[in-house]
Amino acid sequence: MSSQPAVVSALVQPSGIRGRLSRASSAFEWIATRLGPILLFAFIFWIWFPIVDLALMSINKEPFRGIPNGSLTSGWYRSLFSAMGVTSAVRTSALIALVIGVLVAAISFTVARKFGTVRHRGVFLVYVLLPVFVPGLVFGFAVLIYSAQLGISLGNTTVAAVHLAWALPFGFLAMLIATSRLDLRLLEAAADLGATRWQVFRDIEFPLLRPGLVSALLFGFLLSFNELVRSIFVSGQTVTLPLYMWAQNSSHTSTVPLVYALETLIMLGSLALIGVAYWLLFRGASVSRLGRNV
């Protein structure tokens, strides 16, 4: 009987609790050290295997069987560019995405620079970010009903409108992060040394804000180029590339292998675009380091 209070006292002592927490932390660290690389490799494999398998199927004579068995062909790529509707869908999506990317970058750049002087910034930020929290099905259907009531024809304009509403919050956030890190003392010092407003913007402000501008442009282009759910409701006679691929995949016809080749080319184009974006971002690395050092 006398030993029971001693056991209870030992269990509730801070040193005992710290000891158990330390042992649990060590066990968790051991598990993370051993299993972390395995889980990371499994996650990367889970992401990239479907993409690589898609590229392999695009050069397979029998693509529905999966991994090529030695029968390789480039015929799907040759037939792709002669397929009806592919070129038009790619051109439509690229033009709309380019316009949206430029608009997102320009609007985000202009508004984010003046965000500090905006009254009721919290309300304004919620208003800008609201499309992110509205489901795409709801947003697309709402725009469809709104356009019908106002007599607005569905097509490129309505598609571009919903793409802009969807992509702008992401571009604005990227630009807002860049402007929040801008050291205004650099601009004031340049002005005190006799630089004009244009020189201050060209030589100091724009290079420091270029990462945010490139990010906003990239967000706008990619989100518009890949948008499907909202476009279904407001496309009308406009056929974007995601709509074309969705229709082809859901039809289960012999044109599906062409979609494999098309998606592989899109993947390669996306990687090239990311490479260009990284190059543009890191071009301003020396100027950014200068701003931080000052």
Image (spheres, rainbow, N blue to C red):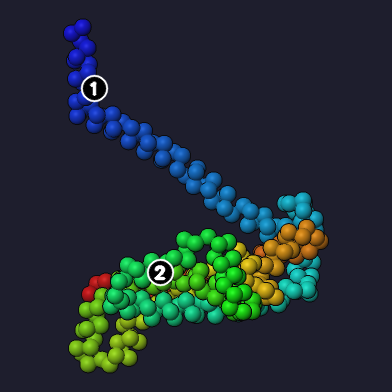
Q: Is residue 2 above or below residue 194?
A: above
Q: Residues within 10 Å of mark 1 (few under 14, many from 20)?
A: few
Residue plotted at (28% across, 32% down): 21
Q: Amino acid at mark 1?
A: Leu
Q: Which residue is mark 2?
A: 127
Q: Quadrant of the C terminus?
A: bottom left
**Residue 100 visible at all:** yes
Where residue 171 sits, quadrant-wise, is bottom left
The x and y percentages for residue 193 are 20, 90
Image quarter in which the N terminus is found: top left
- What kind of residue is marked 2? Tyr
Label 1 SS: helix
* Residue 81 on image: x %, y %: 75, 74
Residue, disc 1: 11
**Local SS, label 2:** helix
Residue drawn 54% across the image and 68% down it = 223
